[in-house]
Amino acid sequence: MNEIIKVSYQNENPTVLGRELHKALESARNFTEFFVKVSEFRINMSRDELKILRSVLVEFASKYGAIAITYLADTIDAERVLPCKQETPRKFKEKQMQSSLLDNFCYAFPNYNLVGAEIPIDGIGRIDILAEDKKSKQPVIMELKVGNRNPNTQLLAYATEYESPILIGITEIELNPSSRNNDIIYYTFSELKEGAAQWVN
């Protein structure tokens, strides 16, 4: 699969780079590793992201067999219909986090200048918050996630559109160390609130 799989939605859900998912799954040395990777993606993805993961899985049918891939596809389909995968509550909560952070940006990140929010990146999605380092002038890309959903895929995708960006993932619940990327700085939303000089509710 040489081309990026792009899925466009009429709502605000960001698209996901199928190529990044394919690359991550292709790095598995055996089916056990492949299964674990798919499972990790599956529990951290939204319904729309799961749809793209399912389409990427098809590419591995010849490598691992149609029966195994069909089983994994079925688990993804089951995950997509779970009530907890409904987008409205998640999106509403992320919007609340984003709004609160924007109102208190100068307190949470005194070394950065706020550039904007919901910055569209063609074929990838929208950057939740874009800022600039006051000294280095490096772009700062921030991705917010409810719960402990992983911001890595989107941040790394957005990073390809900027020169030497600072990448920041902000989650509601602290990410497991094994889910972190060395090129990304992580905060929980509560850490930012507690560490800020002040916070306007």
Image (cartoon, rainbow, N blue to C red):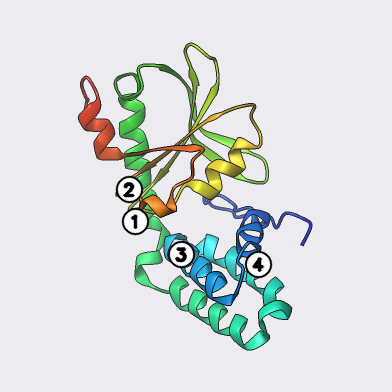
Q: Secondary structure at mark 2?
A: helix
Going from the N terminus, do you reach mark 3 or mark 2 first? 3
The mark found on residue 89 in the picture is 1
Contact, mark 1 vs mark 2 (Cβ under 8 Å)? yes
* Residue at the front extreme, as displayed: 29
Task: Estimate the spatial distance between the alpha carbons at disc 3 and disc 1, rounded to whole Å.
Answer: 22 Å
Count residues near mark 2 (Cα–Cα under 10 Å), then give few for <14, some for 14-19, many for 20+. some
Residue 151, percent across and down?
Answer: 46, 47
Going from N to C along the chain, the mark reached first, 3 or 4, is 3
Furthest-right residue in this view: 2
Kindly identify which numbered label has been placed on residue 93: 2
Residue assigned mark 4: 56
| Residue appearing at x 54%, y 52% in the figure | 11
Instruction: Classify residue 168 by image quadrant.
Output: top left
Res 12 seen here: no
**What kind of residue is marked 4?**
Val
The quadrant the N terminus occupies is bottom right
Identify the mark nearer the N-term, 4 or 2: 4
Residue 167 location (% of width, % of height):
50, 34
Spatial separation of the CA atoms under disc 3 and disc 4: 15 Å
Amino acid at dot 2: Lys
Q: Locate residue 24 relative to residue 1 in the image: left or right.
A: left
Residue 108: image location, x then y, percent: 31, 25
| Left or right of residue 180, residue 23 in this image | right
User: Which residue has dot 3 on it?
Assistant: 40
Front: mark 4 or 2 = 4
Q: Amino acid at mark 3?
A: Glu
Q: Nearer the viewer, mark 3 or mark 1?
A: 3
Between 107 and 72, the residue placed more toward the observer is: 72
